[in-house]
Structure formats: C-alpha cells, structure tokens
Image (tube, helix red, strand yellow):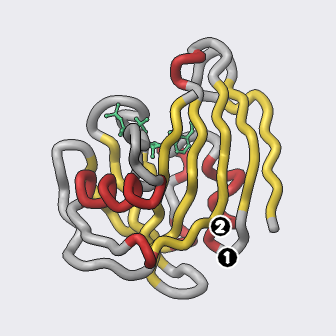
Amino acid sequence: MRSTTLCLPVQGNPAERILLGMKKTGFGRGKYNGFGGKIEDGETPEAAAVRELAEECGIVAAESDLEPVGRLVFTFPARPEDDHDVQLYIIRKWQGQPAETSEMKPVWFAVGDIPYNEMWADDSYWLPAVLKGKKVSGEVYFSEDNEEVDGITIRTE
Ligand SMILES: CNc1ncnc2c1ncn2[C@@H]1O[C@H](COP(=O)(O)OP(=O)(O)OP(=O)(O)O)[C@@H](O)[C@H]1O
C-alpha cells in the first residue's frame, strides 16, 4: 500500500480559514483537497509533506512547523492499487504566497464554508474534528464506484 501525506494550511487557532487546492491532474482530479502526495523511497513523511506543499501551491514550510494530526487508511476494494495510508498535518506558518501550479489551484475557504460536496466523500467525517484541534485515526472503505464511502471508522482523541 502506498504511503502519502496530506497537509492542511490554516489561519487562526482554532482554525478560521483553510487553504484547499483544486486538483487539476491525476488521482482526485476535479476535487478540492489538502496538499500532499506519495512519500518517495528514503524520504520521511515530514520531508514529503514540505516538498508537496512547495510543488503543489508554491509555499515554503519548515518541517518543525508541521503539526501531526493523525493517520487514515483508504481502501478501494475495486481498485486495490489505489489503497493508501495518509499522514495528516496542519500547518499555520510558512513563507510565500499560495499560487496556482500545474497540479493545483489554491483557494481559501472559511471553515464554515468548506465545499465538502466537491471533496473526497470521507473528508466530511474527519476534517471538522481536525479543524477543532482533535487528532484522528481511522479506516475508510470505498464502494465499487471508488467514490462513495461504504464503511468508515474514525477515532478522535
Ligand atoms: C480517498 N479519500 C481521500 N481523502 C482525502 N485525501 C485523499 C484521499 N485520497 C487521496 N488523498 C490525498 O490526495 C493527495 C494525492 O495523492 P496521490 O495522487 O497519491 O499523490 P501524488 O500527487 O504524488 O500523485 P499524482 O501525481 O496525483 O498521481 C495525497 O495528499 C493523498 O493523501
């Protein structure tokens, strides 16, 4: 199973605004999501998270400013090659302005205005808890269409 990162830039503590990116290519194309991707061989999850932030929206973050907020495992029974586990981070401090890249178009959303209907279906189950300052862990099983959530367990701490 592949290992990935997902990083959520936010303003405010507790979070008031979140930066999401409209994915333009590849896995999850056409959906808003946080920033992240595959952890390369020999790379730490933190290094991957910082690299993907720069590649996908042009902001420069320090690994020490990543706040680990949990771990999720996604299972796609109809497409096992897409199974992956995700290390989740929040970040509140970085350098540079978010900018559109070939992969993502970044957009700020008020926390009360998150476009869950244009995101992966699991996000509405765990993102509100993360934005309230909780850590989450869980497993998500997708249905045969690889879009709907068929089963989900989220634990918060
Ligand atoms: C299924 N429900 C999901 N809910 C929330 N977030 C999800 C997700 N599924 C994948 N993600 C995240 O989306 C990013 C793209 O990942 P992924 O495509 O594997 O990586 P990467 O950008 O390196 O490759 P491509 O160039 O797009 O092929 C990565 O942060 C990954 O954690």
Secondary structure type for disc 1: loop
Is any part of residue 44 visible from this angle?
yes
Q: In this view, does 27 lie above or below 38?
A: above
Task: Please name the residue that numbered disc 2 is placed on.
Answer: 130
| Residue 107, image x, y percentages | 32, 62
**Residues at marks 1 and 2 touching, judged by CB atoms closer than 8 Å:** yes
> 131 or 91: nearer the eye?
91
Snapshot quadrant of residue 30: top left
How far from the left and from the top, in percent, is residue 53? 32, 59
Q: Tell which of 111 and 40 is nearer to you.
A: 40
User: In the rendered view, would you say 38 is above or below 5?
Assistant: above
The quarter of the rendered structure image containing the C terminus is bottom right
Task: Give the residue drawn at x 48%, y 71%.
Answer: 66
Q: Quadrant of residue 131?
A: bottom right
Indicate the position of residue 41 as horizontal and vertical percent values. 40, 38
Q: Distance between the residues labelled 1 and 2?
A: 5 Å
Q: Which amino acid does label 1 sit on?
A: Gly
Q: Label 1 crowding class (10 Å Cα cut-off): few <14, some 14-19, many 20+? A: some
Query: Type of residue at label 2?
Result: Val
- Where's the N terminus, which quadrant? top right
Q: Residue at x 27, y 48 (%)?
A: 104
In the image, residue 24 above or below residue 52: above
Give the residue at mark 1: 133
Residue at the limit of the structure toward the front, as seen here? 42
- Horizontally, is 81 left or right of 132 in the view? left
Depth check: 13 or 32 in front? 13
Question: Along the horizontal axis of the image, is 147 left or right of 134?
Answer: left
Residue 69 is labelled as none
Left or right: where does residue 150 sit relative to residue 34? right
Residue at position x 27%, y 39% in the image: 24
